[in-house]
Image (cartoon, rainbow, N blue to C red):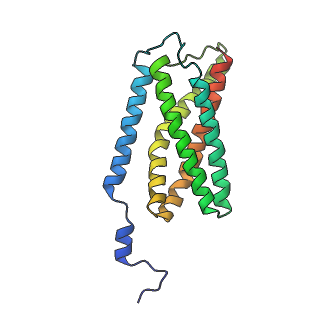
């Protein structure tokens, strides 16, 4: 006879995440990453002079900074077992990241990619190391964030906790380095 703490085979089967959900999340993430790669590196900008919505790069940095704050606050809430506050903070971080993505798409559709104009070798190496790690980890973070949210929203809390241990630091790094990359670009304009 099973105790109330043991999980029956039926409950275990019901708790499994359907494969199509994970495949769908990875497919959407891959399509989004591919679109952004095309937009940044191949699309011809509509406003090369940068006269329309010139504030978008600063807005993107602000979105990343705000996301960082929500992530840190959400982490603190979960450490204190304040589940509802944690959920609200993480949802706010997700919304701000989504707003960032929309603003990023509009900025790159209009203005294209910004060039880093610093000339010192050490500065350029530092910038490109940050930029490359930021880009690679943002591609990795997207499906991780979506799956982590899926686990939370569907009540799969053990899976949520296991994945969130990896998702959180990657998402935080991407948010922080987004601000740093913007600051470096702005300093050498």
* 33 is higher (above) or lower (below) than 52: below
Q: Is residue 126 left or right of residue 34?
A: right
Q: Is residue 59 visible?
A: yes
Q: Residue furthest top?
A: 49
Residue 130 in view (yes/no): no
Task: Tell me if residue 19 comes above or below residue 174 in the rendering.
Answer: below
| Figure quadrant of the C terminus | top right
**Closest to the observer, 176 or 47:** 47
Q: Residue furthest left?
A: 20
Count of marks placed on residues = 0
Query: Which residue occupies 36% across, 41% down?
Result: 28
Q: Is residue 87 above or below residue 126?
A: below
From the top left corner, tell me how far across and down residue 5 is, in percent: 49, 80
Q: Residue furthest front?
A: 52
Task: Give the quarter of the image for residue 183.
Answer: top right
- The location of residue 27, given as percent across then percent down, is 34, 42
Residue furthest bottom in the image: 1
Image quadrant of residue 40? top left
Which residue is drawn at the image coordinates 50% and 64% (left, top)? Answer: 157
Q: In the image, what residue occupies the spot 38% across and 30% down?
A: 35
Kindly indicate the quadrant of the structure image that contains residue 63. Answer: top right
Compared with 182, 72 (above or below) is: below
Relative to 24, is 101 on the left or the right? right
Quarter in which the N terminus is drawn: bottom left
State the image coordinates of residue 130 (x, y, percent, origin top left).
Answer: 60, 30
Residue 52 horizontal/vertical position (percent): 52, 16
């Amino acid at each position: 006879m099973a105790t109330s703490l043991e999980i029956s085979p039926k409950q275990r089967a019901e708790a499994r995440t359907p494969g199509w959900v994970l495949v769908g999340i990875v497919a959407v993430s891959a399509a989004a990453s591919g679109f952004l790669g095309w937009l940044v590196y191949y699309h011809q900008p509509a406003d090369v002079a940068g006269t329309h919505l010139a504030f978008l790069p600063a807005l993107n940095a602000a979105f990343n900074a705000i996301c960082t704050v929500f992530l840190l606050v959400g982490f603190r809430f979960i450490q204190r077992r304040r589940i509802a506050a944690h959920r609200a903070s993480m949802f706010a971080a997700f919304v701000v990241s989504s707003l960032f993505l929309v603003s990023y798409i509009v900025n790159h559709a209009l203005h294209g990619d910004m060039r880093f104009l610093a000339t010192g070798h050490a500065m350029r190496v530092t910038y490109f190391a940050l930029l490359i790690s930021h880009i690679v980890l943002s591609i990795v973070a997207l499906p991780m964030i979506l799956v982590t949210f899926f686990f939370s929203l569907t009540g799969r809390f053990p899976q949520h906790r296991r994945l969130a241990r990896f998702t959180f630091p990657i998402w935080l790094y991407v948010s922080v380095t987004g601000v740093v990359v913007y600051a470096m670009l702005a300093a050498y304009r």
